[in-house]
Image (cartoon, grey):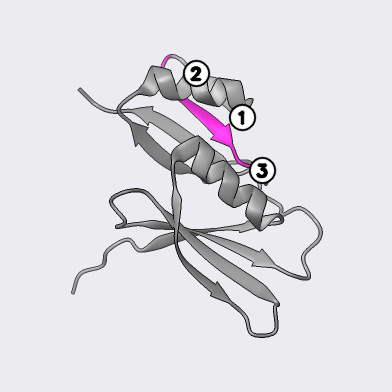
Amino acid sequence: MKFLFNHFNFNVLNLEKSIAFYKEALGLEEVRRKEAKDGSFVLVYLSDENKNFSLELTWLRDREEAYDLGDEEFHLAFVTDEYEKAHEKHKAMDCICYENTDMGIYFINDPDGYWIEIVPEKR
């Protein structure tokens, strides 16, 4: 028996704003969408060019208050082959929320406050 990663979920308040953020900040594209017949929820799956793992954005019609994200101890991580260029882009987007220069990484946060770690490609 083996298990493979499939997707990870973030619940979001503004689906279109989140989709636009992930496209601009990380180049993720929508690969699948599921909408409840009664309009109570929408699930949008975003993926990178490899398409072997997805970020599921869940929008709930009746949710109005921000989600409790705890202490940002959980997060997604992305590796980039152009770390300095990515850092410049995210700085211009004003979404860098934490930098650890000793470790050579930084974090951005999305419109709902989720933290995403940016890691340079190992050389």
Q: Amino acid at mark 1?
A: Cys
Left or right relative to 41: residue 24: left
Can the viewer see residue 104 in this picture?
Answer: no
List the residue tagged with mark 3.
Answer: 111
Q: Name the residue at 51% across, 36% down.
A: 25
**Residue located at (71% from left, 52% from top):** 68
The residue range painted magenta reads: 102-111
Say whether residue 104 is magenta.
yes
Q: Considering the numbered disc 3 on the image, is that residue within a helix, a strand or a loop? A: loop
Q: Which residue is mark 2?
A: 88
User: Disc 3 to disc 1, how far (Cα)?
Assistant: 9 Å
Are the residues flagged by discs 2 and 3 in contact, CB closer than 8 Å?
A: no
Residue at point 61%, 49% (across, down): 18
Quarter of the rendering occupied by the N terminus: bottom left
Query: Is residue 107 one of those drawn in magenta?
Result: yes
Quarter of the image for the C terminus: give it. Answer: top left
SS assignment at label 1 = loop
Identified by mark 3, the residue type is Pro
First-in-chain label (3 vs 1)? 1
Residue in front for this viewpoint, 9 or 69: 9
Q: Secondary structure at mark 2?
A: helix
Q: Earlier in the sequence, mark 2 or mark 3?
A: 2
Residue placed under numbered mark 1 in the picture: 95
